[in-house]
Image (tube, helix red, strand yellow):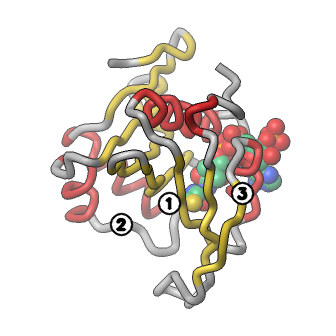
Amino acid sequence: MSRKISDESIIRPLGIGDIGTVELMEQECFSAPWSRDSLISDIVLNPNARYIGMEKGNRIVAYAGMWVAYDQAHITNIAVTTGERRKGIGTLLIERLIQMARSLGVASMTLEVRVSNLPAHAMYGKLGFYIASVRKKYYFDNGEDAYLMCKDDVQSGQGLST
Ligand SMILES: CC(C)(COP(=O)(O)OP(=O)(O)OC[C@H]1O[C@@H](n2cnc3c(N)ncnc32)[C@H](O)[C@@H]1OP(=O)(O)O)[C@@H](O)C(=O)NCCC(=O)NCCS
């Protein structure tokens, strides 16, 4: 099902036809981008994964995904193309994932984020995620630590604007 944001933007599930665009955005947005094979195996083949994208003018400009297992969900990734940042799109996609998780009976959500990624910390914090612990040397490209961030109030709907 697609969700209409404005006349030219929708949020919809990602599929095999989006892999090329997502691969390019991975390379644009991350120092350790996922490979094409990893994207296919998660976005297309993993039955426990849910990936959504924002399409604007027939172009994917942002995407986000999570794994869901029983009453837990883990956000795997989110990226907004450079020219579309700071317009609320990242927030909208994470809110959408939280709503999907909520409807699937998820109680709590987690994610890992680089300790240096201040924009992402701020966005997640506004959505009710808190830093639960540090995972030392989590990222293989530069040995950077990750924060494990959690949100325990998924069923309350707190932190959602819609
Ligand atoms: C992190 C990211 C997804 C945020 O997407 P976005 O659409 O720009 O975020 P939003 O517009 O919804 O911003 C929400 C809030 O996050 C914070 N924020 C976002 N970008 C910020 C920045 N560059 N500097 C400081 N705070 C920032 C602000 O508090 C912002 O609210 P405000 O605009 O009202 O002040 C985007 O910067 C991105 O794609 N980064 C590269 C990939 C990445 O790091 N992904 C996260 C992996 S864990």
Image-quadrant location for residue 74: bottom left
Tag 2, which secondary structure? Answer: loop
Neighbours of disc 2 within 10 Å: few (<14), some (14-19), many (20+) = some
Say which residue appears at 55% left-offset and 47% top-offset.
Answer: 81
Q: Classify 8 as above or below 26.
A: above
The mark found on residue 34 in the picture is 2
Residue indicated by mark 1: 28
Question: Where does residue 41 sit, x and y in percent of width and height?
Answer: 19, 58
Label 2 residue near ligand 1, CB within 8 Å: no
Position of residue 149 in the picture relative to residue 25 (left or right) = right
Image-quadrant location for residue 113: bottom right
User: Marks 1 and 3, how far apart in space?
Assistant: 27 Å
Please, what is the three-letter code of the amino acid marked with disc 3?
Tyr
Residue indicated by mark 3: 130
Tag 1, which secondary structure? Answer: helix
Say which residue appears at 25% left-offset and 64% top-offset.
Answer: 38
Please, what is the three-letter code of the amino acid marked with disc 1?
Glu
Q: Earlier in the sequence, mark 1 or mark 3?
A: 1
Is residue 92 among what the camera can see? yes
Question: Where does residue 86 sit, x and y in percent of width and height?
Answer: 73, 41
Question: Where does residue 61 sit, x and y in percent of width and height?
Answer: 49, 38
The mark found on residue 102 in the picture is none
Eye-nearest disc, 1 or 3: 3
Please, what is the three-letter code of the amino acid marked with disc 2?
Trp
